[in-house]
Structures are given as C-alpha cells and as structure tokens.
Image (cartoon, rainbow, N blue to C red):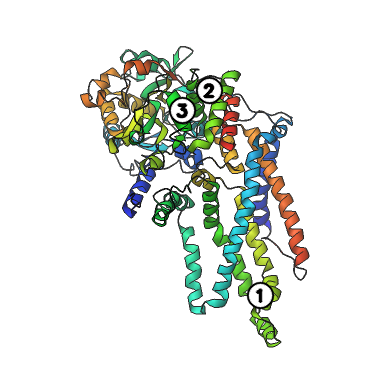
Amino acid sequence: MKKNITKKEFLKELRKYEKGSTTRREFLGRTGLGLATAVFSAYGLSSFGSKANANIGDRVVLATWPNYHDVNNFENFKKQTGASVRVNVFGSNEEMLAKLQAGGSGWDVFVPTNYTISTYVDEDLIEPLDLSKLSNYNAGSFEKRFSDAGKVNGKVYAVPKNWGTTGYVVNTKHTKKTPTTWKEFWDLTKTSFSGRTMVHDYQLTTIGNALKYFGYSFNSVDTKELADAEKLLLECKPHLFAINSDYQPSLRNGDAWMSMCWTGDGKQLNSDLPEMTFVLGKEGGELWSDYYAIPKGAPHRDAAYALINYLLDPQVNSKEVLAHGYPSADSRTNALLPKSLLEDPILYPAKDLLSALEFGAAVTLTDPNRAELMARFKSA
Amino acid sequence: MLFPASFWFGVMLILPLIVITIFSFGERAPNGGYIPSFTFDQYLNLPARFVAFKNTLTLAPIGTITALIIGYPLAYYLVFKVADNKKNLLLILIIIPFWTSILIRTYAWIFILGSKGIPNLLEYVGIENLRLINTSFAVLVGIVYSYLPLMVLPIYVSLEKLDKRLLEASSDLGASNFKNFINIIIPLSIPGIATGCMLVFILLMGEFLIPAFLGGGKVFFVGNALVDLFLQSRNWPYGSAVACSLVIIMLIIVSIYMKFINSKNNREEVSII
C-alpha cells in the first residue's frame, strides 16, 4: 500500500525545489523565471565598510548556475581581496546569451557551457583571456578535450570549471536487468515502462539521445537522420509520462520510473534512493563542460581575473567540488579529492563509457530544424 | 490628467505591439534574434503551430465555461445566502490564494494529482491506476482553480448591486424563485458574467505555466510555443508572428463576443475594463 505524501515530505520537496537542488538549470529556463528573477545578490550585501582593496575594487559580479559554488570560498575571497562576490543565478544558456545580447548585464564573470562559447565569440560578446593574469590556470593539468573547448581560433576565451554527462536514471525496482543502452531506454518506454518515462524539455538532449537509438551522432543536423529521430519520438510520445527537465520530484514520488538525467541529479537521486541507477548509454551521448569567461565591457575586470584565478587554485577548487558535487577536469584538484569521490561511477564514469560521449556542438543548439522538430514533438 | 493613461497605453501596449509587428516580418539571425527584412515567411509558417492554437482555442473556452459554472453559484451564494457580517470573511478567503505565487500553487497540484495524491485515495474505493497528472484534465483543473476568483469577483459585484426590491416586487406579483432567477437575476448580472468570462478567457489564451506543469509538457499551448521560440530557439520573428496572430484571434473573438453580449443586454453597454 502506498502512503500519501505527508506535509513534511511535501515541504521537503518544495524546499529542495526552491533551493534549486532538484534541478540544475532547466526548470528556471523553461518557465522563463530565471530571467525574471535572475538578479538576486546572495552575497556581499554588507560590503560597505569592509577593507577596500584599491587594486581590484570592492565587488565582482558572477553569473552562474544554481548550487554551483562553495559559499565559504567567496567569503575567503572577500577576506583576501576585499571584493565581495555578487551572484546572479541563471536557468539556461539561452537566457545567459539573451541577457548578454541585450547588453548592460553588469557581469564580470559568467559560466557558459562548452557549446555556447563559439557563439559568444561570433557575437563579439566575450574577450580572449589574458593568461598572464591567471597564474593558477595550467592547461596541461586538464584533459585536452576540456581545455580545448575553451579555445576559439587558437585563442583561449574560457577556462574549464566543472563537467558532467547526460545519461538516464532508471528505477531498478521495476526492471529485471539494468539497461545499458539508449536503445533499451526507448524500447522500454514503448513497452513495460509505458507512461513512466520522462525526457528533457530540451531539444539538445532529447533529440540527441533519440538519434543515439539509431547510432547517429548526438549532434546530427542531417535531414534524414533527424527524420528517423522524429519518427521514434512521435512513436514514444503517447508512452511518455512527461516532457520536463524537472524530473526529480516525479522520480522520487514514484510517478516516473525512468528519465534522461544529468550527472548531478543522478548523483543526488542515487544517494537518497539506491534503486535509482544512473546509466550512460553504451552508444554514447552528451558530455558537457562549463567554463569561466569574461564578457566584453565587464565593469570590474581586475576583480574578474582575480576571482577566476582564485577559483582555479586547486585547494579552493577541491572545496568547490566537495560542496556542489560536480566533477572537475583539473588533475591537480582531483589529487586533493577523497578516493571515494574519484571512484564514484556516476561522477567519474569508466573510460570506455566516457570515450563514446560527444560534446554538444554550437550548431546543434542553434539549428532551426531541430527547434522545429522539438515543437512538433511537443505539440503532437 | 489624461497623460498617465495615454503614456501607459503608449509605452506598455502600443509600442510593444508595433515592435512585434515589425519583428514578425523579419528573419531569424543565424545565432538567434532578429535581422530586419520584409518577408511573409513567418506567417506562411504558422501552420507549424496549428496544434498549439487548436489546444488553446479548445481548452480556453472549456476552462472559461467551467469556471463560470462553478463561479456563478458561488457568487450567488455569497450575495444571497450568506449573512452580511460573514460576507467579507468569505470574500477574503477567495482572494487569499492570490497572496501566494501561482508557481507554488500550481506546484502543489502536481502532488495532489500525482499518484500519491487523489489517485491513491481512489484506490481505497477500487479505482486502480488512474492517471490524472500530465493530462488535459489536470490542466483544466489547474486553470479553473487558478482563475476562479477572477470569475467570482465581477459576478459578485454585479449581483451585490442588484436592486433587491425588484425581487420582492416580482415575488409579490406571484413569480416563483426560479422565475426570479431566470428573468431578473441572470439578465441583471450579465455585465458581471461578461467581465468575468472575458478576464478568464483572455488570460487563458496566453497561459503557459499550467500546461507546462500539470500537462507535463505534453499539452502544448500557444503560450508554451512562444516561450520556446523566445527562450529556447530564439526565433524572434517567428515568435512575433505567432504572438501577433494570437492577438488578432483574440481581438476577433472578443469583438464578436461583445456584440453578442450587448445585443442580449440592451439596457446598458457592457464594458470590459
């Protein structure tokens, strides 16, 4: 017999949602609320009267994702430099782009995802980084594909923050054997998991992982391949529980049994409910990485460099990782992390699974055909 | 004296309409946004959002009528059946939900309609595996719940200011309560009904939050299409064309509706605002 949700459970869910820990970014993005409520400064409201550092000013504005930093690090940064960190939280890369395109963002540092960096360069919205001001950045200590994704035309525009994957989480109480491929994800959806599967409300991952069913590239914009993916999506649509990137609540209360899932959500679900198993499709899928970058016309440029440099310090960065739970690509940082974390199969997946993954491409995000396909899928 | 009003209409209404009209004839820039142009491509592409328009134009009237069916008896009860000293309390109870964000209230419905909510209770009476959440029905429930006060309040006002002596007079002349209701109360409350229906209908046409939350992203309204076009694919010209079309459809429906209402109600012109 199932239990009714109690008041306490409800409030717990609500609080998690309010804190943003149930979703990384998509909820805010989808509703557009991120943009509307973006400008809240969580820190540094009392910066007046603190010891001002003449060199870098008294503040630095950071646009980032929910629950993505260790607050203590910001406090130490303020103690060391006199600059308080003001945080703007965002829900989607598209919103960040829209805000910078509109101008006057007032940001000094922001945290774009790999596939948007070249678009920012195209639109002339970010500046190449002066690496002489980032003494803690050592490209050699990063895996090459992570450091390279911050480069456009040979110039470094962004330095790696954290990375993750997009797989799926499945409630193994309802399966005889744990699936291992995207083919099984979609086949289960059409059969025994009918009415229990969730996919992201995000074309990049939903279309990308449907493409993986046929073994195509996650980033394909090929008309024929997209047509195959569309056929699969439309076939699965009646069997879906929801198209929603805010999937933790439905998985936790038992309505949904399986969902596309980002690393951090997978880790959180699995920690609380061991039957929630995070799977990376053998065929591949998405590997993503976030970066620090400085927008053109940043009002506190010196403070921006100081903050990025501070956060790249392995000592500081390892505390960040422990606080937010997303893996770092910096080998110096990883050397300082506990072994249990580094051996966690969700955070640091096996090499053979990782090598099949692809970075999302800029064209994948901006391709109008993929956007229209997603609209047809959602309205079907 | 008229300056604030005309300023408001100019800046908050006319200007944005002009902007989206201009945008709707433009083209999407490769990285999203807008480049100036003069093309009807965006309008020719409108059939690609046919389902969104169809869903909106189906659920908005159904939602409005359901809200009326529930809201009218409620307003009637408040005006005629509740003692004067309790009226204000009950009115406040109707308004109180507005003090909380619609986001939180809609989120609460996810739990109420989810499998551990109402469907779980229904299992005690033998109804198994009922799926409520992420259906059109759930969207309808959310819509009616959220917009009911907007229906109740205008009807309440028009019933409240109804001259009660008319009812006494017709009763004295032998009319039954039912006749009073049909011949006096309903005709005199038409302005309230018209205002309530319009308020609810217009807001429903632009709704996106409730379908996204309670429809699980599977019930696609024009509002959802607009959010995706502006925030995800950043196709401003196409989004503008969809928005312009929505405004035009609404203007047509509202003007036909006003004509109809005013022909039914010759004594006084009904105005919406």
Mark 3 sits on what residue? Answer: A187
Q: Residue at x 56, y 31 (%)?
A: A234
SS for dot 3:
helix
Q: Residue at x 47, y 59 (%)?
A: B97
Sequence-first disc among 2 and 3: 3
Seen from the viewer's position, the closer of residues B233 and A137 is: B233
Side of B199 relative to A308 (left or right): right
Side of A118 relative to B20 (left or right): left
Q: What chain does badge 1 belong to?
A: B
Q: What chain does badge 3 belong to?
A: A
Q: Which residue type does callout 2 highlight?
A: Thr
* Residue B192 coordinates in the image, percent (x, y): 65, 66
CA separation in Å, label 1 and label 2: 62 Å
Q: Are marks 1 and 2 on the same chain?
A: no
* Residue A248 coordinates in the image, percent (x, y): 38, 39
CA separation in Å, label 2 and label 3: 25 Å
Q: Are marks 1 and 2 in contact (CB under 8 Å)?
A: no
Seen from the viewer's position, the closer of residues B235 and B58 is: B58
Residue A113 position by quadrant: top left
How dense is the environment of label 2, judged by Cα within 10 Å: few (below 14), some, or many (20 and up)? many
Q: Which residue type does callout 1 highlight?
A: Phe
CA separation in Å, label 3 and label 1: 59 Å
* Residue A73 coordinates in the image, percent (x, y): 28, 33
Q: Are marks 2 and 3 in contact (CB under 8 Å)?
A: no
Mark 2 sits on what residue? Answer: A364
Q: Which residue type does callout 3 highlight?
A: Asp
SS for dot 1:
helix
Residue B118 position by quadrant: bottom left
* Image quadrant where one finds the C terminus of chain A: top right
Could you say which disc has been placed on residue B181 in the image? 1
Seen from the viewer's position, the closer of residues A177 and B65 is: A177
